[in-house]
Image (cartoon, rainbow, N blue to C red):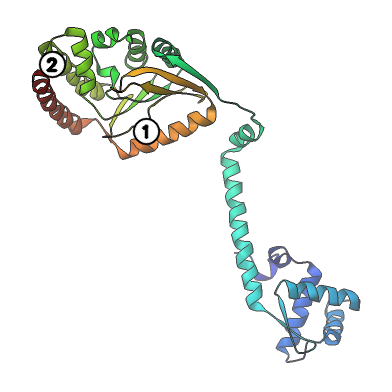
Amino acid sequence: MAKLESIDAPGILGITDQQLNLLKTIYKLNTKNKAATPREIEAAYAKDYGGGIQKSNLFRQMKILQDKGFLTREGEANYKINFDGLKKTLDQRKQEYTQTLQHYEQLTNETEEYFRKTTSSEKPQVEYLDYNELFARLTKSIKKSHKYYITAKFPGMVYTYSPYSSAGRGDYIQTLIQKCFEKRELEVTYLTPLDLDYPFTHSMNLYKDKQKALRECELILNQLESLVEIHQNLHIIYLSNPYGLDVVIPESNDLDESYIFIRDEKMNVTGGIYIRSSETAKRSKETFLNLCRTGQEISGEYSKKICKELKKKLTELVDAYAN
């Protein structure tokens, strides 16, 4: 801790050295029980600080100190130090200093981001994509990404190839699998309600037979359980209702792309909106990760438990479909 007398009191209080010396002069007169009149202040100041002070300047400086709340005046001309006013100013300036210190820390931590934001004239690029264009563009984005965030009714990477291929997403899912599982160059995070209607409907569209669809979905659930245990770079986060955020965010060296799914009344994807904007992608990622924290990752014993529950729901779904 610094010695008290070495503290830069004028700088902290926002006054000049001369104004601080006037306060000290008045304080000494107060402690000696002398009336701090302009005449006494002028004489004591000249004695302690080696020079006089012009009367016009004295009154001007005293007025400034009164306006700041550092001095009070009793009667016609008896000045006293207002310690409450001094402490109030110190509290206010401390709050300002704390805020400035936070700005120092933030600017230190985000120097490059500061220059990017204050010089950017970025205008978002927005495109509507039909179904085929959407998955072709997503496939292209995957190839240059190292992280991939996606909301899904059910995680497509755990499907067998047939349902996804029949839905026109074969190249897309194969690119994901190759880069995530085989090359281990991509970390994929799904946010999903694990809605069994989705894989079951896909399987029914493919096989036109509820027992074959049942077996296909059982294979999918077995893959769900095994893949999350085998592959550390696949994260499936269960959240009962993640919608309101129906997005894909591919992250490469530049986080500047995001996609919004367009769905029909049955919640099937019919196309999408491509947005090229670093600010939008960053905000979308923050929202996505915040939602992930409210969900539960499918892994370990929880993986076994939820897959068992899903298999039971699947049987109920098939029975209901038969009726």
Which dot marks residue 244?
Answer: 1
Q: Residues within 10 Å of mark 1 (few under 14, many from 20)?
A: few
Q: Residue 105 location, x and y as percent?
A: 58, 46
Dot 2: element: helix
Q: Amino acid at mark 2?
A: Leu
Residue position marked by numbered label 2 in the rendering: 214
N-term mark: 2 or 1: 2
* Residue 216, above or below 104: above
**Looking at the rendered structure, which numbered label has been put on residue 195?**
none
Report helix, strand or loop for mark 1. loop
What separation in Å lies between label 2 and label 1 (alpha carbons)? 30 Å
- Assess disc 2: are there few (<14), some (14-19) or many (≥20) residues with their C-alpha within 10 Å of its C-alpha: many
Q: Is residue 218 visible?
A: yes
Closer to us: 53 or 123: 123
Image check: 9 left or right of 230?
right
Most foreground residue, 82 or 268:
268
280 or 46, nearer to the observer: 280
Give the amino acid type for the residue marked by disc 1 in the picture: Gly
Residue at coordinates 81% horizontally, 71% vertically from top-left?
A: 18
Q: Position of residue 50 (x, y in %)?
A: 88, 76
- Looking at the image, which residue is at 40% across and 10% down? 132
Q: Would you say 118 lies left or right of 182 here?
A: right
Question: Residue 165 in the image: x percent, y percent?
Answer: 29, 8
Q: Quadrant of residue 90?
A: bottom right
Q: From the viewer's perspective, is 35 left or right of 255?
A: right
Q: Which residue is at a point 31% across and 40% down the rendered structure image?
A: 294
Is 133 situated left or right of 191 in this image?
A: right
Q: Quadrant of the N terminus?
A: bottom right
